[in-house]
Image (cartoon, rainbow, N blue to C red):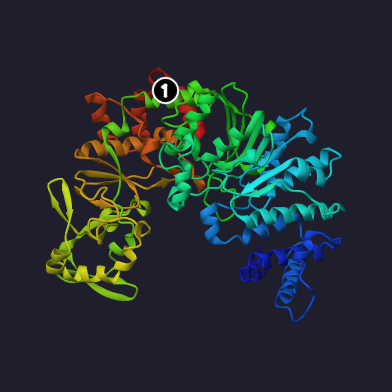
């Protein structure tokens, strides 16, 4: 969207005024005529130079005409989604779904409905936003039948959204579609309802309701941390939300499936985490328990939605109980007809709901099983741990601009504060470390308001801080109001200046650091016992030699092949290094001769020459070919 168009839209905050601007511009630019009695008339801005909104309309039309070839329905949907307030986007997960994605979903759903009488169908979007999926379904039916918009809206399309203005905009969109086709718009009937799908009762709206033939859409993605207390309470009504901290999209699978009739089809674009995440376990169990046929078109690390770092997939489910999951990872740009894709099939009994589903071809699955069945799992060899969590690192980690014998000089927002050295500890940030630079050049200092007593770290009280660390305490007083906003101000800490979480505050041992996400093996060994770290992970052990060996093993193609096939993908070829994904990687149980050879080996090729037989025995050459072909 161009800056001129967005600038005009950003200046209007009233919902009705935005709707009026967009409807008036769409009708005028496309030379449509609204008949007398149409409810759209209320959105037409009167032509008057004394009307500020009319002046904005002229500027907006000029910007649109000079920027775009034509004012299409797709552009209108994009504008509608753009003017959803940032707060509403956070709370409701509203986002524009690209046209080619909607079309791929709707086309495949209707392929699966082949042979049904379109006039008898009921198709729903239970988080409809501004109506993009309705438009796509309508255009599909119009292109293949003699039905008109009046009939489709009254008898086929059903929808719900938590925001009333989204329902209004869906009606506007569909009304304009009818108007464009030359149909009358003064007597349209809609089955679109404002309401929360977590508790919405469709049987109260549809007499004799027996289920929908299809549910399509883009369920809202809102993390657990950003939900209201009321929404979290509603999640308890759904069995798929009982593992981990469920995100808002998760119950929408169960809601949609239970709204389908026995032959119904579900088609979503949705977050792809569910098939491997901790909070998706109950959902995986639900799918397996009902033996639903699933089709997953995974877009991996591709970001389909503009300006949104969410990783998605197309998801289809039908209630025929054959117990098959069909899976492919591909790029969204080549997905036009889902039927043409070459899927891997897996039965539920071959998938592990606890670990997360790994759906690969039999050759890759075989290699992964051999790796996991080798020796001892990584998490049994060394602890895989998160770093400290202050929840306000920028306030605790010092920006050192000078120092004296007893103090660091910390600069914050242009003001310099002395901080006692004695209350500071060394700290490192694995997410930005450079494995080619010495670790000591990458450490900083952090305020550490704790006294270590054995394995415990006890936060100082205010009296101790005032008497012994008055400079640090004075600085923390300056930022106290910001610290108080951690956890939305709802959590009571041991002391108001304590770290946000107790994890890793006092964790003895040496560290093998790694970032949260990586595009290749990225590890850095520390021989500083108990070194603090944040924004990253570490393998922790009291045995430095053990970590040196792990550093060699994990910097191999064997490990990275495992990561790329097991872990969560991110944009630009990055993968998660989280404990959930790497914990089951097998570490070979090696004899003294093998360990001596590993200790002596320096080059990656020499290390892999030692390791491949440990993992694959007589199948070394075949495994090597599979791994090399996959990674090249």
**574 and 212: which is toward the camera:** 212
Is 278 placed left or right of 324 in the picture?
left
Is 590 placed left or right of 69 in the picture?
left
Quarter of the picture containing the N terminus is bottom right
Q: Residue at x 82, y 61 (%)?
A: 30
Question: Is any part of residue 565 visible from this angle?
Answer: no
Question: Is 458 above or below relative to 83?
Answer: above
Residue 2 point in image, percent of width and height = 66, 65
Question: Is 317 above or below relative to 526?
Answer: above
Residue denoted by label 1: 620
**577 and 485: which is toward the camera:** 485
Residue 394 point in image, percent of width and height = 33, 63
Under circle 1, the secondary element is helix
Residue 54 point in image, percent of width and height = 74, 74
Question: Is any part of residue 552 visible from this angle?
Answer: yes
Name, please, the residue furthest toward the bottom: 50
Is 596 placed left or right of 257 in the picture?
left
**417 and 289: which is toward the camera:** 289
How dense is the environment of label 1, judged by Cα within 10 Å: few (below 14), some, or many (20 and up)?
A: some
């Amino acid at each position: 969207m161009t800056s001129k168009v967005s600038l005009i839209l950003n200046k209007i905050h009233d919902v009705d005024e935005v709707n009026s601007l967009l409807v008036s511009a769409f009708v005028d630019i496309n030379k449509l005529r609204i008949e007398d009695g149409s409810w759209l008339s209320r959105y037409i801005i009167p032509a008057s130079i004394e009307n500020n909104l009319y002046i904005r309309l002229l500027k907006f039309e000029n910007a649109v005409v000079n920027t775009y070839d034509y004012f299409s329905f797709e552009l209108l949907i994009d504008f509608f989604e753009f003017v959803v307030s940032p707060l509403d986007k956070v709370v409701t997960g509203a986002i524009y779904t690209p046209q080619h994605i909607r079309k791929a979903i709707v086309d495949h759903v209707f392929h699966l409905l082949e042979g049904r009488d379109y006039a008898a169908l009921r198709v729903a979007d239970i988080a409809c936003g501004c109506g993009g999926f309705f438009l796509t379904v309508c255009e599909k039916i119009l292109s293949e039948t003699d039905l008109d918009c009046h009939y489709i809206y009254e008898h086929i399309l059903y929808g719900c959204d938590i925001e009333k203005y989204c329902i209004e905009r869906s009606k506007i969109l569909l009304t304009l579609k009818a108007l464009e086709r030359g149909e009358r718009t003064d007597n349209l009937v809609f089955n679109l309802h404002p309401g929360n799908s977590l508790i919405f009762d469709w049987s109260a709206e549809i007499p004799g309701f027996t289920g929908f033939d299809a549910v399509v859409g883009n369920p809202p993605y809102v993390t657990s941390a950003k939900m209201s207390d009321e929404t979290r309470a509603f999640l308890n009504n759904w069995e798929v939300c009982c593992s981990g901290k469920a995100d808002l999209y998760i119950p929408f699978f169960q809601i949609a499936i239970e709204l389908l009739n026995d032959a119904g089809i579900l088609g979503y674009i949705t977050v792809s985490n569910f098939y491997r995440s901790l909070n998706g376990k109950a959902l995986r169990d639900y799918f397996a328990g009902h033996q639903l046929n699933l089709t997953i078109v995974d877009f991996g690390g591709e970001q389909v939605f503009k300006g949104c770092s969410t990783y998605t997939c197309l998801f289809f489910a039908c209630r025929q109980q054959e117990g098959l999951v069909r899976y492919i990872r591909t790029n969204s740009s080549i997905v036009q007809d889902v039927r043409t894709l070459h899927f891997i099939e897996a039965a539920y009994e071959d998938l592990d709901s606890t670990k997360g589903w790994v759906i690969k071809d039999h050759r890759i699955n075989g290699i992964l099983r051999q790796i996991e069945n080798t020796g001892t799992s990584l998490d049994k060899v060394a602890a895989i741990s998160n770093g400290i969590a202050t929840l306000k690192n920028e306030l605790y980690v010092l920006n050192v601009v000078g120092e004296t014998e007893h103090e660091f000089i910390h600069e914050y927002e242009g003001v310099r504060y002395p901080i006692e050295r004695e209350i500071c500890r060394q700290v490192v940030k694995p997410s930005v470390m450079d494995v080619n630079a010495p670790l000591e050049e990458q450490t900083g200092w952090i305020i550490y308001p704790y006294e270590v007593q054995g394995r415990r770290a006890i936060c100082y009280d205010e009296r101790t801080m005032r008497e012994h660390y008055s400079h640090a305490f004075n600085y923390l007083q300056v930022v106290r109001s910001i610290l108080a906003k951690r956890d939305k101000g709802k959590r009571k800490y041991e002391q108001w200046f304590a770290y946000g979480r107790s994890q890793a505050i006092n964790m003895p041992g040496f560290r093998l650091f790694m970032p949260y996400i990586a595009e290749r093996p990225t590890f850095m060994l520390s021989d500083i016992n108990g070194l603090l770290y944040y924004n990253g992970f570490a393998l922790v052990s009291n045995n430095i030699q053990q970590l040196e060996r792990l550093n060699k093993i994990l910097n191999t193609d064997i490990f990275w092949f495992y990561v790329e096939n097991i872990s969560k993908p991110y944009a630009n070829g990055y993968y998660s290094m989280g404990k959930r994904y790497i914990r089951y990687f097998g570490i070979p149980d090696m004899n003294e001769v093998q360990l001596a050879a590993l200790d002596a080996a320096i080059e990656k090729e020499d290390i892999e020459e030692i390791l491949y037989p440990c993992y694959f025995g007589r199948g070394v050459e075949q495994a090597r070919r599979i791994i090399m072909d996959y990674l090249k």
